[in-house]
């Protein structure tokens, strides 16, 4: 069974486009994805909003099977290596901490996050998978990829074509290979001052 055939039981509390319910983060991937498709994901990210139009996001990437891939792959924790081996690309998302005039951009990661979501939604519309990860060695990533200190390392993203569940990920992971639920809007939104219930 393929991941996209898994029954999606997500239900919106309020009307939204179905792409928000359909987008999730599978781990079952295959590397059948072109660099042309990858560039379309970056094109979508290009048009994301940012503070003062500073566009702080930067992407470093490596294609599976290349020398660069081995380096990027070595940055992941062991759990993520198990399933990322079948990704087409690994992408390191960075955000520049300062505007071009040298002033600090306190929203640099917010801008990078908006670019990441644009990339994720474009991937979903193309029936591709994009899965973000915090599970990697940050200091090793900075050293090995020669990333300057004025760039924040936000995450690593695995992208690729949709893979078969069986055969591409271990049996223990297959049970969780389905869209997860999210907190209710009422748990995330409050009218007025900071509520005690969030403490």
Image (cartoon, rainbow, N blue to C red):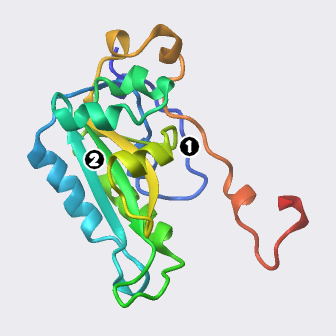
Residue pictured at 43% horizontal, 37% vertical:
25
Read off the residue under disc 2.
Answer: 123
- Disc 1, SS: loop
Q: Quadrant of the C terminus?
A: bottom right
Residue pictured at 41% horizontal, 31% vertical:
26
Q: Is residue 18 visible?
A: no
How many residues crowd mark 1 within 10 Å: few (<14), some (14–19), many (20+)? few
Q: Is residue 85 above or below residue 117?
A: above
Residue pictured at 41% horizontal, 44% vertical:
23
Q: Residue furthest right?
A: 196
**Of the pair 20 and 153, the residue shown nearer to us:** 153
Specify the quadrant of the image occupied by residue 10.
top right
Label total for image: 2
CA gap, disc 2 and disc 1: 22 Å
Residue pictured at 34% horizontal, 32% vertical:
73
Read off the residue under disc 1.
Answer: 11
Q: Is residue 133 above or below residue 31?
A: below
Q: Is residue 106 visible?
A: yes
Q: Tell whether 39 sits left or right of 193.
A: left
Q: Is residue 117 above or below residue 130?
A: below
What x and y, as percent, mark residue 181?
60, 39
What x and y, as percent, mark residue 125?
26, 48
Q: Is residue 43 above or below residue 157?
A: below
């Amino acid at each position: 069974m393929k991941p996209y055939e898994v029954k999606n039981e997500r239900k919106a509390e309020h009307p939204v486009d179905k792409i928000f319910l359909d987008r999730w983060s599978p781990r079952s991937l295959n590397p059948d994805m072109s660099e042309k498709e990858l560039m379309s994901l970056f094109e979508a990210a290009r048009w994301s909003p940012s503070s003062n139009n500073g566009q702080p996001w930067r992407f470093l990437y490596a294609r599976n099977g290349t020398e660069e891939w081995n380096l990027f792959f070595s940055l992941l924790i062991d759990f993520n290596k198990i399933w990322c081996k079948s990704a087409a690309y690994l992408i390191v998302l960075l955000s520049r901490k300062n505007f071009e005039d040298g002033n600090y951009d306190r929203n640099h990661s917010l801008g990078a996050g908006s670019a990441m979501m644009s990339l994720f939604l474009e991937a979903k519309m193309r029936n591709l998978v994009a899965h973000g990860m915090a599970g990697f060695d940050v200091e090793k990533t900075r050293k090995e990829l020669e990333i300057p200190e004025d760039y924040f390392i936000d995450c690593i993203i695995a992208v690729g074509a949709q893979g078969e569940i069986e055969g591409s990920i271990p049996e223990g992971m297959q049970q969780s290979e389905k869209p997860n639920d999210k907190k209710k809007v009422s748990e995330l939104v409050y009218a007025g001052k900071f509520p005690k219930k969030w403490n």
